[in-house]
Image: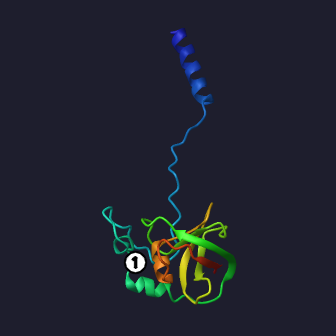
């Protein structure tokens, strides 16, 4: 009996000294701040129209942004992940997520977007490029503004 009590004390002390491990789920990804959150394209998408799940009304609303904002700079943009829906730009010009607009340099073409901090060259969503009237393989110079 004495050995059992000693064993229980040792196990109890070992348990008390063990690090506490909590099962903590990863935080959910930050929700985009825009009111347009179209569904992702179907897995069978092959055409521009299938990948761009925004409606004509969504594109019209995004293409008529209010002016203003703080100029973050200009950069050359390329097509981002076409399976990532909505209007967004990922750029090293952006230091914190927020809302803004992108203007096609030398034109008045403009689109409201979610601003996403980037680690490389600027990448824009397929719907945003379409609103600007840019070809999907073009590398347009854009001005990025934060609201």
**In the image, what residue occupies the spot 50% across and 79% down?**
134
Is residue 10 rendered to the left or right of residue 34? right
Q: Which residue is mark 1?
A: 54
**In the image, what residue occupies the spot 49% across and 75% down?**
87
Q: Position of residue 59 (x, y in %)?
A: 44, 83
83 versus 5 height, above or below: below
84 versus 24 height, above or below: below
Q: Position of residue 95 (x, y in %)?
A: 67, 67
**In the image, what residue occupies the spot 52% across and 47% down?**
24
Closer to the camera in the image, 9 or 24: 24
Q: Is residue 35 among what the camera can see?
A: no
119 versus 85 height, above or below: above
Closer to the camera in the image, 145 or 121: 121
Closer to the camera in the image, 69 or 6: 69
Q: Quadrant of the C terminus?
A: bottom right
Q: Position of residue 77 (x, y in %)?
A: 57, 71
Name the image quarter holding residue 89. Answer: bottom right
Name the image quarter holding residue 112. Answer: bottom right
**In the image, what residue occupies the spot 54% across and 9% down?**
3
SS of the residue at dot 1? loop
Q: Position of residue 33 (x, y in %)?
A: 53, 74
Name the image quarter holding residue 97. Answer: bottom right
Q: Is residue 53 among what the camera can see?
A: yes
């Amino acid at each position: 009996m004495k050995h059992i009590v000693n064993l229980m004390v040792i196990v109890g002390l070992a348990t008390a000294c063990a690090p506490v491990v909590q099962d903590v789920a990863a935080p959910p990804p930050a929700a985009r701040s825009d009111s347009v959150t179209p569904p992702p394209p179907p897995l069978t998408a092959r055409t521009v129209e299938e990948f761009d799940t925004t409606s004509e009304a969504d594109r019209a609303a995004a293409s008529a942004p209010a002016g203003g904002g703080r100029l973050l700079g200009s950069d050359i943009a390329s097509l981002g992940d076409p399976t990532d829906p909505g209007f967004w730009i990922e750029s090293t010009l952006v230091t914190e997520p927020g809302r803004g607009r992108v203007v096609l340099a030398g034109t008045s073409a403009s689109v409201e977007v979610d601003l996403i901090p980037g680690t490389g060259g600027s990448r824009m969503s397929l719907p945003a490029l379409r609103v600007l009237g840019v070809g999907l393989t073009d590398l347009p110079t854009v001005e990025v503004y934060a609201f």
